[in-house]
């Protein structure tokens, strides 16, 4: 039931010029269409775009490389092709594929960032941040009230104003993925949210998860 941790630390704010930024309803959402990462030898220009069918193979190979150890949920090539419209890719200005992420929309109340991952050899260039900003922009453009994700590195997403939340609030996510996950009762991920949390539903989800075990053992007197 995992979302991938983005394989890079938070980077400094993107060098956008405020006078040319479009206006969005949420002031925290910036549109990272093109970003420049400068090194001692050269400048790398990054951009995001909606994925196309020809990107499916690269997306599948990257996700598959992080699914064997449980970092990512495995996704078949056929599944990625059929859901290619949910994916966004980040690339260089020379069309070099660097990473991907998907925005799964449950409804106007909730969307989920899924399968977010970048190539490990470009760690620190800002590609992961590009993807987060772009998916938040897409959700905002659709009027989505809340964006959730499950991650092992919450500190990274706090940089983008995500906050820790109770995973059972995300009923749609739990019903879709968590209740079928073999690790649902030993989940090591943190649920996080950006925006207005979904309203509680009538059906409780407590039965889907085992209660958390106490940290300390108590010796019984026999």
Image: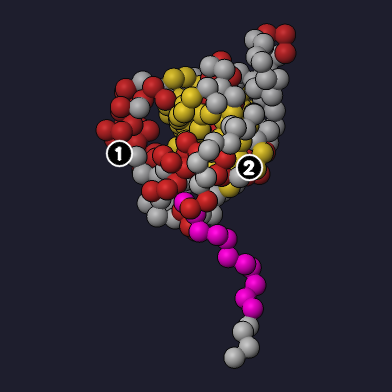
For marks 2 and 1, give the CA distance. Answer: 29 Å
- Residue span colored magenta: 208-218
User: Circle 1 sits in a helix, a strand or a loop, which is it?
Assistant: loop
Q: Which mark is residue 150?
A: none
Query: How is the rendered protein coloured?
Result: secondary structure
Question: In the image, is residue 73 part of the stretch drawn in magenta?
Answer: no
The answer to whether residue 5 of the structure is visible from this angle is no
Quick one: quadrant of the C terminus? bottom right
Question: Is 20 positioned to the left or the right of 141 in the image?
Answer: right
The image shows residue 169 at horizontal and vertical percentages of: 57, 40
Choose top left, top right, bottom left or bottom right for residue 156: top right
- Disc number lying in front (2 or 1): 2
Q: Earlier in the sequence, mark 2 or mark 1?
A: 1
- In the image, 34 versus 210, the foreground residue is 210
Q: Residue at x 55, y 59 (%)?
A: 211
Residue, far bottom:
222
Q: Disc 2 marks which residue?
A: 165
Q: Residue at x 57, y 61 (%)?
A: 212
- In the image, 147 versus 96, the foreground residue is 147
The answer to whether residue 180 of the structure is visible from this angle is yes
Question: Is 11 positioned to the left or the right of 105 in the image?
Answer: right
Magenta stretch, main secondary structure, is loop
Choose top left, top right, bottom left or bottom right for residue 86: top left
The image shows residue 79 at horizontal and vertical percentages of: 31, 33
- Would you place residue 36 above or below residue 80 in this image? above
Q: Which mark is residue 76?
A: 1
User: Circle 2 sits in a helix, a strand or a loop, which is it?
Assistant: loop
The image shows residue 118 at horizontal and vertical percentages of: 49, 37
- In the image, 64 versus 17, the foreground residue is 64
Q: Residue at x 56, y 44 (%)?
A: 167
For mark 2, does the 10 Å Cα neighbourhood hold few (<14), some (14 to 19), or many (20 or more) residues? Answer: some
Q: Residue at x 47, y 19 (%)?
A: 49
């Amino acid at each position: 039931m995992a979302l991938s941790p983005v394989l890079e630390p938070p980077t400094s704010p993107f060098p956008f010029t405020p006078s040319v930024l479009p206006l969005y309803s949420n002031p925290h959402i910036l549109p990272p269409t093109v970003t420049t990462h400068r090194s001692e030898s050269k400048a790398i220009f990054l951009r995001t775009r909606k994925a196309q069918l020809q990107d499916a193979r690269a997306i599948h190979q990257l996700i598959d490389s992080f699914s064997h150890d449980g970092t990512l949920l495995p996704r078949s090539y056929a599944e990625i092709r059929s859901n290619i419209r949910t994916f966004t890719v980040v690339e260089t200005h020379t069309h070099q594929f660097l990473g991907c992420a998907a925005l799964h929309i449950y409804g106007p109340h909730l969307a989920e960032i899924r399968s977010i991952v970048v190539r490990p050899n470009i760690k620190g260039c800002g590609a992961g941040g590009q993807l987060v900003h772009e998916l938040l922009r897409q959700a905002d453009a659709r009027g989505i009230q809340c964006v959730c994700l499950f991650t092992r590195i919450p500190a990274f997403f706090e940089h983008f104003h995500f906050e820790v939340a109770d995973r059972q609030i995300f009923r749609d996510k739990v019903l879709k993925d968590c209740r079928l996950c073999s690790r649902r009762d030993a989940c090591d991920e943190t649920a996080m949210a950006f925006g207005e949390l979904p309203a509680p539903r009538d059906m409780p989800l407590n039965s889907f998860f085992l209660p958390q075990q106490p940290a300390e053992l108590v010796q019984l007197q026999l």
